Image (tube, rainbow, N blue to C red):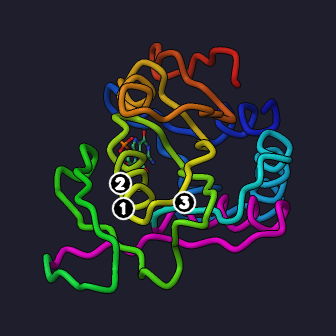
Amino acid sequence: MKELEARIKEDGRVLGADILKVDSFLNHQIDPKLMQAMGAEFARLFKDQGITKVITVEASGIAPAVMAGLSLDIPVVFARKSKSRILSDDAYTADVYSYTKQSTNQIRIDKRFLSADDHVLLIDDFLANGQALLGMKALADDAGATIVGAGIVIEKSFQPGRQAAIEAGLTNIHSLAKIAAFENGQVVFEEAD
Ligand code: 5GP
């Protein structure tokens, strides 16, 4: 998505070897118009596939997921993160390790909001090592829901997330921007999906 790539080039900051900071439009301050355009693009990529629900993880997945849900005219459910390991019978839960934060969070979705009748689209802000996506997949699998595909805002293709997701059986993955490398603090894109 050219508009997103341009914005990453303009406002993104490369931190260290493998982190892209985009907190001026996605991860802290949010650009609603850009989110709306991304939601419309997700809807275009996943239309007519019988999706009943968009699933994401708080917090940064929520803005693009809501806009996708708006464009597809379906509800959005965000998995809540909690450090606590208190298990509840009425929620699907999975552990997600974050390499960026170097900690494990349990993510959870109340059973009232995900069922075997659902055909879900998984959305997230970044695809890096794939742990968040695999966590969402685990919740959907537990519910017996059908996963139709995954929509990612920014994929770092030089990290193993997509491969891990494919090996876990996820197909139909579309990323709006794909980063091949960081070179001298600059972002190098590859063709997006
Ligand atoms: P994963 O490694 O599970 O694919 O990435 C999980 C989460 O880590 C993403 O949802 C995102 O919140 C965060 N993340 C991973 N890489 C980056 C990055 O380069 N920049 C930012 N801002 N977040 C990242």
Location of mark 3 (residue):
61
| Residue located beneath label 2 in the image | 138
Identify the residue at image location x=65%, y=55%.
Answer: 25
Image location (x, y in percent) of residue 177: 65, 31
Circle 3: element type: loop
**Which residue is labeled 1 in the image?**
142
Q: Is residue 90 above or below residue 127?
A: below
Ligand 1 under 8 Å from disc 3 Cβ: yes
Quadrant of ligand 1: it is top left
Amino acid residing under circle 1: Asp
**Mark 2 crowdedness (10 Å alpha carbons): few <14, some 14-19, many ≥20:** some
Q: Is label 1 in contact with label 2 (beta carbons under 8 Å)? A: yes
Mark 2 or 3: the one toward you: 2
**The magenta stretch spans residue 68:** yes
**Three-letter code, disc 2:** Ala
Report how far apart the C-alphas of labels 2 and 3 lie in the structure: 17 Å
Picture quarter containing residue 171? Answer: top right
| Left or right side of 37 for 153 | left
- Read off the magenta span: 58-84
149 lies above or below 175: below
Residue located at (48% from left, 44% from top): 21
The kind of residue tagged 3 is Gly
Marks 1 and 2: which is nearer the front? 1
Horizontal side of 85 relative to 92 (left or right) equals left
User: Height in image: 64 above or below 45?
Assistant: below
